[in-house]
């Protein structure tokens, strides 16, 4: 019988794997590649994209870092300073990525040092395709080289995007792509959070936790309350349409692997109540809290929202369980988030343009969370109530709570088990 050469065998094997991959039969090894324990609570920080887009440079990043410190945001927990798309220059002759020499003349290592000296962490952006969404060099084929470079610069967090990864059957396999970058980070020897940003296109909640610490669940957010804006082949959505996609995903998020409904538009929404609601609901979802506004120019009322310690505590609760939609009406909803102390956070969201009077007669409604196995019978168990916005104590769950919630606003209460 004719011998098949080793070269042919390899080629045949590669072909078979390719066919199997196309047929969706190959599952990449499940062994944990990511560096674990980097995001036991949802990451908190700032990112340049939502407010500045491509118009960034090192002066802006430094000024923002200074304002994050002086405004109290850092001490409230916002430590990541993430430089999104458009920091890149060209690769050098050896293929090493370099920053844009005009926008980042001091280099990225100097920027990392600046952030670290202020008790902040350094985040950077790249893409699993040949180019980023804004057409800068992507990391495809350079993953190990880029991760090594980021490690030299002191990077702590990589947001890894999904533009220009091919179309249809030609498209890069997302698990392979994110696994490769995850392995590249591990090989670099530096602990870096990996933020998976493929917009929820391939159900990342089912697999991305092996490789990264958070994964986008939707397309891009935009600074409106209830709109969807088409950009041709893709669209972006406001707060409510994004929120509406989250309830079904809550079972997948938790410590070290978070559903990411995108960076916040708090500070960028037209009405104060909308900024409050957006923050409250992202806190309730156990979402990453990544600020996307102009921090040096931030109004005091926005700082007050973002630094509210009770809302942050709800978001950062160590149980890491996102809220469930408990009661839904067309105009208002009540969401309930189980907390590690046996209590709950309760949010009353007014979706409508009219003030809504909502009464919660605790004993008359069952609060049962099948996903995380928590049930509260308010006839048997009583809870104290604190208004999470103001910190003021309310009546307890033995009496109904009535609250007028302003248009587009959200009331939030923390329920703590009562010792009688
Ligand atoms: C994609 C991402 C955004 C942002 C831009 C940058 O749209 O989803 O969050 O990073 O790319 O070009």
Image (cartoon, rainbow, N blue to C red):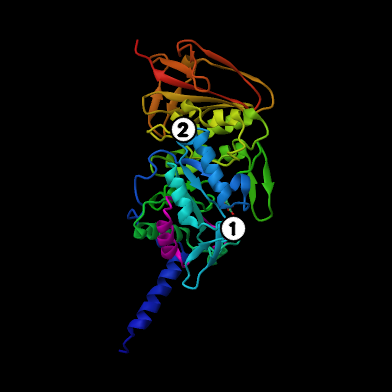
Q: Secondary structure at mark 1?
A: loop
Query: Ligand 1: does it lie within 8 Å of the C-beta at label 1?
Result: yes
Q: Is residue 325 visible?
A: yes
Q: Nearer the viewer, mark 1 or mark 2?
A: 2
Q: Is residue 46 shown left or right of residue 418?
A: right
**Residue at x 62% of width, y 37% of height:** 297
Res. 195 visible in picture: no
- Above or below, 170 against 365 in this view is below
Quadrant, the C terminus: top left
Q: Residues within 10 Å of mark 2 (few under 14, many from 20)?
A: some
Q: Position of residue 384 (x, y in %)?
A: 43, 15
Residue 162 lies in the magenta-colored region:
yes
**In this image, 228 relative to 215: left or right?**
right
Q: Is residue 96 magenta?
A: no
Front one among 184 and 216: 184
The range drawn in magenta is 141-165
Name which of mark 1 and mark 2 comes first in the sequence.
2
Pointer 1 residue: 133
Residue 28 sits in which quadrant?
A: bottom left
Residue under pointer 2: 76
């Amino acid at each position: 019988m004719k011998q098949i050469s080793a070269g042919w065998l390899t080629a045949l094997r590669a072909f078979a794997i390719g066919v199997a991959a196309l047929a969706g039969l190959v599952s990449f090894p499940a062994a944990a590649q990511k560096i674990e324990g980097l995001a036991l609570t949802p990451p908190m920080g700032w990112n340049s994209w939502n407010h500045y887009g491509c118009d960034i440079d090192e002066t802006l990043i430094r000024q923002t870092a200074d304002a994050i410190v002086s405004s109290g945001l850092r001490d409230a927990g916002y430590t990541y300073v993430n430089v999104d798309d458009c920091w890149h220059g060209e690769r050098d002759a050896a293929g090493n990525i370099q920053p844009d020499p005009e926008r980042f003349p001091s280099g990225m290592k100097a920027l990392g040092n600046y952030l670290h000296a202020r008790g902040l962490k350094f985040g950077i952006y790249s893409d699993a395709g040949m180019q980023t969404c804004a057409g800068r060099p992507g990391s495809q084929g350079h993953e190990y080289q880029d991760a090594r470079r980021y490690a030299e610069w002191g990077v702590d967090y990589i947001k890894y995007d999904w533009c220009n990864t091919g179309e249809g059957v030609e498209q890069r396999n997302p698990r392979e792509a994110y696994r490769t970058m995850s392995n590249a980070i591990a090989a670099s020897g530096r602990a870096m959070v990996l933020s998976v940003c493929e917009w929820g296109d391939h159900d990342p909640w089912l697999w991305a936790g092996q490789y990264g610490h958070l994964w986008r669940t939707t397309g891009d957010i935009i600074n409106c309350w209830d709109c969807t804006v088409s950009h041709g082949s893709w669209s972006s959505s406001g707060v409510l349409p994004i929120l509406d996609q989250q309830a079904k995903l809550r079972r997948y998020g938790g410590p070290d692997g978070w559903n990411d409904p995108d960076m916040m538009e708090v500070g960028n929404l037209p009405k104060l109540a909308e900024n409050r609601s957006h923050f409250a609901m992202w806190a309730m979802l156990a979402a990453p809290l990544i600020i996307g506004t102009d921090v040096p120019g931030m109004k005091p009322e926005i700082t007050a929202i973002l630094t509210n310690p009770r809302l942050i505590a709800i978001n950062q609760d160590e149980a890491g369980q996102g809220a469930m939609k408990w009661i839904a009406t067309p105009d208002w909803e009540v969401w309930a988030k189980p907390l590690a102390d046996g209590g709950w956070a309760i949010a009353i969201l007014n979706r409508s343009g009219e003030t809504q009077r909502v009464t919660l007669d605790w004993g008359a409604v069952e609060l049962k969370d099948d996903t995380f196995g928590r049930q509260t019978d308010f006839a048997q168990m009583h809870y104290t109530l604190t208004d999470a916005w103001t910190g003021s104590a309310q009546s307890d769950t033995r009496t109904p709570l009535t609250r007028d919630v302003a248009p587009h606003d959200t009331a939030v209460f923390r329920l703590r088990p009562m010792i009688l």
